[in-house]
Structure formats: structure tokens, C-alpha cells
Image (cartoon, helix red, strand yellow):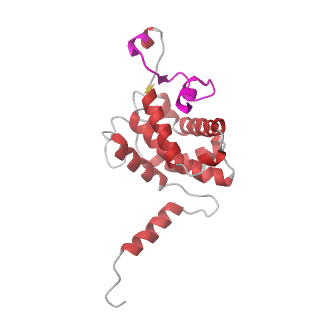
């Protein structure tokens, strides 16, 4: 339902961009460009809904839709070049849709408890994660997503981007602090302890 609505809602950044089936050739002859398969968006929304702790607290599917639409508008704003040039970037391919859908759960779960659910609120977090990866198709190196695919890669990308998120309340990277704390507990005690 949410994926379908993202495609049809004129206020959605995905409006008219989702290929819902049928002949892509026929779509092109009508002068339309459908960049993303419906299954990719649907799978991404499913991942977001399964990973988010707070989105279900809204109760109403309409409100959940507005939050998700707002999040994707923030993605479009923060990653404007990547969004507007899909032939040059991987953001609107399966790996991008899935990675950003998984990341959405982390971003939304930071924003809902703080009562901050506007495009600017989501954009603030996305901006923190923007430099983590290079989404160019021809990119190479450790920050490149080129050549990555599948659910496991999307989970790795989203987790790595989530590590960059900082909360304005503490001004520190909470996930990074938790990871460091837990890693310290993995180390064996020293011989003299």
C-alpha cells in the first residue's frame, strides 16, 4: 500500500518514477521514465517497517505513509545530485533504495521520540551520513558502493551510514559510543587483573 501510494501521490518524491509492471518499452514510448521497480520500493518499505521501533507507535497507516514520504523527500534533497542523475549514480538502484530504507528506520527512530519529523529534521541526519559512501556508478575505493548488491550489502551500507549519525542533545555519536563500549567488553581481561 505505501509503495503504491509513493508512486501515485503527486507530493511524493517517487511520483511517476516507479515501474509498476508491464512493458518498460511501452512506458518509454509514452515518454515516461520509470527508474525504479515497484518490487524494490516495496521491499525497501518492508525493511523499513520491520526495522523501525517507533513508526508503528503512530498506529495509523496514513501517518506512517507521511513519515516515509517525508523521509524520502529529505533523501532527495540531501542527495540531490545523485537523485537527479540516476544514470551516473546507484542511489535509485536496488542497493540504494534498500540501503536508504534500512537507514530510514534509524533516522525515523531518532526523530519520532524527539518530536521532530519534518524534512529538515530527517535532512540533518542524512547530511551527517552523506560523505560515508560514494554513490557514483564508476566510483572505486573503500567508500564506493559500486559492485555491491543484495540484502547483506544493503545492511552493511545502512549500518555504516547509521554509525555517522549524531544526536543534537548529546552532540556525540551514540551508536559509535555504544559500539566502543561493547567492543571493550569483548577484550579478554589482562593477566594482572
Q: Quadrant of residue 1?
A: top right
Figure label count: 0
Compared with 92, 175 (above or below) is: below
Question: Residue 105: horizontal and vertical position, in percent?
Answer: 53, 47
Closer to us: 39 or 30: 39
The extreme right residue here reads 115
Residue name at image x 33 percent, y 49 percent: 142
Which residue sits furthest bottom? 192
Residue found farthest to the front:
59
Question: Vertically, is 128 above or below 35?
Answer: below
Residue 63 position in % (x across, y down)? 66, 39
Foreground residue among 9 and 129: 9
Residue at 64%, 36% (x, y): give it.
66
Asked whether, in this view, residue 129 is left or right of residue 119, the answer is left
Indicate whether residue 12 is drawn in magenta. Answer: yes
What are the residue bounds of the magenta stretch?
A: 1-26
User: Where is residue 149 shown, x and y percent of the image?
Assistant: 33, 39
Question: Is residue 114 a member of the stretch shown in magenta?
Answer: no
Q: Residue at x 54, y 35 (%)?
A: 76
Task: From the top left corner, tell me how far across and down residue 123 is, in percent.
Answer: 59, 44
Identify which residue is drawn at 56% across, 36% down. Answer: 72
Residue 9 falls in image quadrant? top right
Q: Is residue 139 above or below residue 188?
A: above
**Quadrant, the C terminus:** bottom left
Foreground: 52 or 123? Answer: 52
Q: In this view, does 14 lie to the left or right of 183?
A: right
Q: In which quarter of the image is residue 170?
A: bottom right
Amino acid at each position: 500500500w505505501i509503495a503504491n501510494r509513493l508512486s501515485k501521490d503527486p507530493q511524493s518524491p517517487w511520483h511517476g518514477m516507479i515501474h509498476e509492471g508491464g512493458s518498460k518499452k511501452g512506458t518509454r514510448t509514452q515518454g515516461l521514465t520509470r527508474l525504479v521497480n515497484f518490487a524494490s520500493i516495496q521491499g525497501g518499505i518492508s525493511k523499513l517497517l520491520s526495522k523501525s521501533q517507533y513508526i508503528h507507535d503512530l498506529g495509523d497507516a496514513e501517518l506512517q505513509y507521511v513519515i516515509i514520504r517525508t523521509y524520502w523527500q529529505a533523501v532527495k534533497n540531501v542527495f540531490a545530485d545523485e537523485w537527479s542523475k540516476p544514470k551516473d549514480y546507484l542511489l535509485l538502484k536496488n542497493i540504494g533504495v534498500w540501503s536508504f530504507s534500512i537507514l530510514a528506520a534509524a533516522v525515523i527512530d531518532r526523530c519520532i521520540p524527539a518530536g521532530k519529523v519534518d524534512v529538515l529534521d530527517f535532512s540533518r541526519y542524512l547530511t551527517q551520513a552523506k560523505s560515508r559512501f560514494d554513490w557514483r556508478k564508476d566510483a572505486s575505493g573503500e567508500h564506493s558502493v559500486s559492485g555491491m548488491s543484495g540484502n547483506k550489502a544493503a545492511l552493511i551500507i545502512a549500518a555504516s551510514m547509521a554509525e555517522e549519525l549524531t544526536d543534537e542533545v548529546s552532540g556525540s555519536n551514540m551508536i559509535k559510543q555504544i559500539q566502543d563500549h561493547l567492543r571493550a567488553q569483548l577484550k579478554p581481561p589482562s593477566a594482572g587483573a
